Image (cartoon, rainbow, N blue to C red):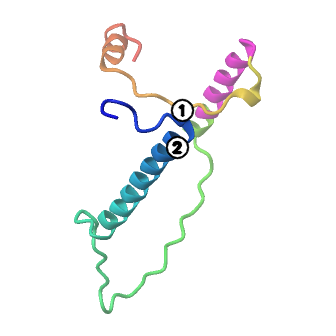
Amino acid sequence: MEGQAVTTNPWLIMAINMTVVFVVLILLGVLMTIVHLIDPTKKKKEVPASAPVAAPAATPVAAPSASAQNEDEVVAAIVGAIVAMGYSSEQIASIRPTATSAKWRLEGRLSGRG
């Protein structure tokens, strides 16, 4: 029996492999729980003995400023352009500004646009 496979039954091989996988997953879960319990990087809670709790201050609601109105106009223009390209307004998930690269800012400054 030297050099021959112990079994060729595919169901037995599958059961052995699945057992090994799930045992390893369970052991990793236990290890993660232990690390979570003894986490040295976790910040410790500091509760002062007699610290008075201040009530949050009420912030006044300001009228929409000119920049907010301009942002609304920019968003409306962007949505209009996207809808004109054939997309519906329901397909637009979000519109947010991206970080502008330094090369584009420099080009805008040199050309007198910004």
Give the percent coordinates (x, y) of residue 27: 37, 58
Q: Residues within 10 Å of mark 2 (few under 14, many from 20)?
A: few
Locate the N terminus and report the quarter of the image it occupies. top left
| Magenta span dominant secondary structure | helix
Taking 113 as reference, is 12 left or right?
right
Give the amino acid type for the residue marked by disc 2 in the picture. Answer: Leu
**Which residue does the image show at 35% across and 60% down from the upper left?**
32
Q: Which quadrant of the structure image shows residue 83?
A: top right
Of all residues, the one furthest to the front in this rendering is 1
Q: Nearer the viewer, residue 73 or 34?
A: 34
Q: Nearer the viewer, residue 41 or 58?
A: 41
**Which residue does the image show at 72% across and 27% down from the upper left?**
91
**Which residue does the image show at 66% across and 22% down from the upper left?**
77
Q: Secondary structure at mark 2?
A: helix
Residue 12, label in figure = 2
Span of residues in magenta: 71-86
**Which residue does the image show at 37% across and 31% down from the upper left?**
4
- Counting residues from the start of the chain, the first of labels 2 and 1 encountered is 2
Examine the structure image and report whether residue 7 is included in the region drawn in magenta.
no
Q: Which residue is mark 1?
A: 96
Q: Nearer the viewer, residue 81 or 42?
A: 42
